[in-house]
Amino acid sequence: MQRRAFTFALAAPAGLWLPEAHAASLSETDAATGIRSLLERGAMSAIGLLGKNDGFLGNPLVRIPMPGYLNDAAKLLKTFGQQKRVDALVLAMNRAAEAAMPEAKTLLVGAVKSMSVEDALQVVRGGDNSVTEFFSGKTREPLGTTFLPIVTKATEKVSLADKYNSLAGKAASFGFVKPEDANIQQYVTTKALDGLFLMIGEEERKIRKDPVATGSAILKKVFGALK
């Protein structure tokens, strides 16, 4: 069976021109392989960056703060000599997210390996958030289930976590905190997932910008055409 050239699907969405000589050698299968390779590299790189000490806490893009109104309340607590306790909770939240990251590997790689050619085409045709949307749609729910007990175990070490849940529950009843943020374990789990998908997107952009630097022949073949 003759494989179709991937010229239009790869080049047209970004308004880019793909040289015909290159297009002739680039099939949809090649392109799908390239997309899978990009996603897997991006996912593994993001996990490596986040799943280590200060992966969340030391990165302003994903650092997990106290939510909404409680962030303001935390500032007030600090003025009353409670800074250490507040800092301990913020530290615990971020450490919990960091501890959960390695558990994402199996699910993310599984999503990539089961990716169809049509899935790959959608990622290419999509905008800047296409990779995030792909991973979120395929893995957010099962990852949340996997992360939650890890986050719960980590936050239980800080006695202030229970007080957070009590205070956040009251704040939520007055509309100061979103209901989904009123439980520290659920809040951290959600933020951990948001941070993971954000960093996967950041890694994707780096690979697209400089595919040669990856050392991958298929990535150079697919994304080198867009340079």
Image: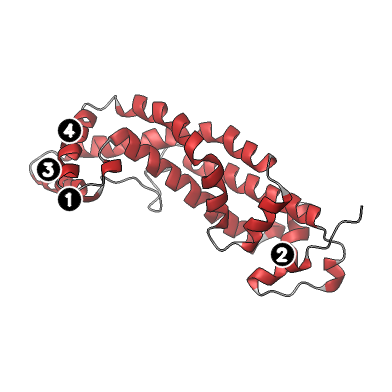
* Above or below 31: residue 195: above
* In the foreground, 178 or 35: 178
Residue beneath disc 2: 10
Alpha carbon distance from label 4 to label 3: 16 Å
Residue beneath disc 4: 166
Is residue 222 left or right of 125 when viewed as pictured? right
* Above or below 116: residue 27: below
Q: Amino acid at mark 2?
A: Leu
- Of marks 1 and 4, which one's residue comes earlier in the chain? 1
Total tally of numbered discs in the picture? 4
Name the residue furthest left: 80
Q: Amino acid at mark 1?
A: Asp
Residue drawn at x 69%, y 59% as measured from the top left: 211
Residue drawn at x 25%, y 27% as measured from the top left: 158
Residue drawn at x 9%, y 46% as measured from the top left: 79
Helix, strand or loop status at disc 3: helix
Alpha carbon distance from label 3 to label 1: 9 Å
Alpha carbon distance from label 1 to label 2: 46 Å
